[in-house]
Image (spheres, rainbow, N blue to C red):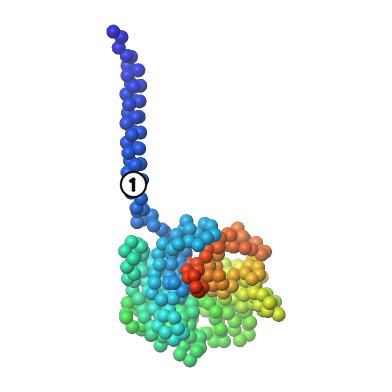
């Protein structure tokens, strides 16, 4: 009787082992398919998520839902009033502003750590880490909410007499059930701001107008922010545009270039055009009033995106704009914003959460701005 050769027996054993491995893999895949619960860590990356503050509250949209036009569903919704603003600090903590609804009603600012947010996504139990509450006696109806590079909270709003003011609440003031007095209150001399933003050096920039400049951006140095008063801007960047335009929003890209958005009202005012400009970082030095040549000028067409109040860059250098008519977040790609011309958003996210009313979008962000 002839016995199989050693080579043949080795081949047969290898085939048997391969078959066993295939069975084990198939069995594991079967079990994996039965358990469809995603791991908590895979829910989202807050720094790449889009955060939006609107009438429904403050919502988070996962990165994968931002790739194409549509009406994405949020993965996190914080409800505590009208969303007035949202920011992420350098530690990844979420800061938000809620408004009660009326011009003299209460408002409150809160902070949530990344671990708090992860817990909230699972338990739906909204419990901020620290918060600060105001009944409207200090700042009436804050319009703009920003963080400086040190994590202090700044609000652009009104005082009790109806005058504009910019106030700071230091980070160590949070945690009380009653709002302390602002650490700093500023009423810039001859300035009528529409929005505020900080650069990486802690300088405060204001879009709007002055007594002598119809439209532009004004700078207060970080040294001018340490005590209350009525400081005069150290630099005014006047609009070069000859049309009647007023900046309503501003932001900085990663290179430190300044981006402004203006709504242009032609005469006669038959339409509204959105007009964007990029001012080089090197052209933002000096003092006095300057009129630098924009590196890029963009037009969003007619009627454009109405009621834009905030701009934000994502991790890939794409520029996002909020809008309230219609309620939306709209993306201009990094390639689109490199050169002059008329552009149309490549992605439009419908953020209208109500069927009987329109939601006002007030703020959007991706991660630390400075």
x and y, in percent, of residue 74 in the image: 44, 63
Q: Residue at x 66, y 77 (%)?
A: 265
> Left or right of 117: which side holds 326?
right
x and y, in percent, of residue 363 in the image: 49, 71
> Left or right of 53: which side holds 10?
left
Farthest-out residue, left: 1
Q: Residue at x 53, y 70 (%)?
A: 327
- Nearest to the observer: residue 47 or residue 136: 136
Farthest-out residue, bottom: 161
Residue 158 at least partly seen: yes
Farthest-out residue, front: 356
Q: Is residue 362 above or below residue 334?
A: below
x and y, in percent, of residue 367 in the image: 45, 64
Q: Residue at x 67, y 64 (%)?
A: 341
- Nearest to the observer: residue 286 or residue 338: 338
Residue 237 at least partly seen: no
Viewport quadrant of the N terminus: top left
- Nearest to the observer: residue 323 or residue 147: 323
Q: Is residue 17 above or below residue 60?
A: above
Q: Which residue is mark 1?
A: 34
């Amino acid at each position: 009787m002839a016995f199989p050769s050693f080579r043949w027996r080795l081949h047969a054993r290898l085939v048997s082992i391969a078959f066993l491995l295939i069975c084990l893999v198939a069995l594991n895949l079967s079990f994996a398919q039965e358990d469809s619960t995603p791991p908590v860590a895979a829910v989202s990356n807050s720094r790449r998520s889009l955060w939006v503050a609107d009438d429904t509250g403050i919502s988070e949209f996962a990165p994968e839902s931002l790739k194409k036009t549509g009406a994405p569903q949020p993965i996190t919704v914080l409800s505590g009033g009208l969303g007035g603003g949202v920011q992420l600090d350098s530690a990844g903590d979420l800061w938000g502003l809620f408004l009660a609804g009326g011009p003299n009603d209460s408002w409150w600012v809160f902070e949530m750590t990344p671990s708090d947010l992860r817990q909230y996504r699972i338990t739906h139990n909204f419990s901020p880490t620290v918060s600060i509450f105001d009944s409207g006696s200090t700042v009436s109806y804050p319009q703009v909410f920003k963080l400086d590079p040190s994590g202090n909270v700044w609000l652009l709003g009104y005082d009790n007499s109806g005058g504009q003011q910019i106030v700071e609440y230091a980070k160590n003031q949070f945690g009380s059930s009653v709002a302390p007095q602002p650490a700093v209150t500023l009423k810039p001399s001859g300035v009528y701001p529409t929005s505020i933003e900080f650069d990486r050096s802690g300088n405060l920039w204001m879009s709007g107008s002055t007594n002598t400049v119809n439209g532009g951006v004004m700078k207060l140095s970080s040294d001018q922010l340490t005590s209350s008063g009525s400081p005069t801007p150290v630099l005014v960047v006047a609009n070069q545009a000859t049309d009647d335009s007023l900046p309503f929003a501003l932001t900085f890209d990663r290179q430190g270039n300044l981006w402004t958005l203006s709504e242009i009202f032609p005469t006669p005012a038959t339409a509204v055009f959105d007009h964007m400009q990029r001012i080089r970082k090197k052209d933002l030095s000096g003092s006095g009033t300057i009129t630098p040549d924009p590196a890029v000028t963009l037009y969003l067409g007619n009627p454009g995106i109405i009621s834009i109040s905030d701009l934000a860059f994502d991790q890939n250098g794409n520029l996002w704009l909020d809008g309230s008519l219609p309620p939306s977040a709209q993306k201009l790609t990094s390639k689109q914003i490199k050169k002059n011309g008329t552009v149309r958003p490549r992605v439009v996210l419908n953020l209208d959460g109500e069927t009987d009313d329109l939601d006002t979008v007030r703020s959007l962000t991706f991660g630390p701005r400075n």
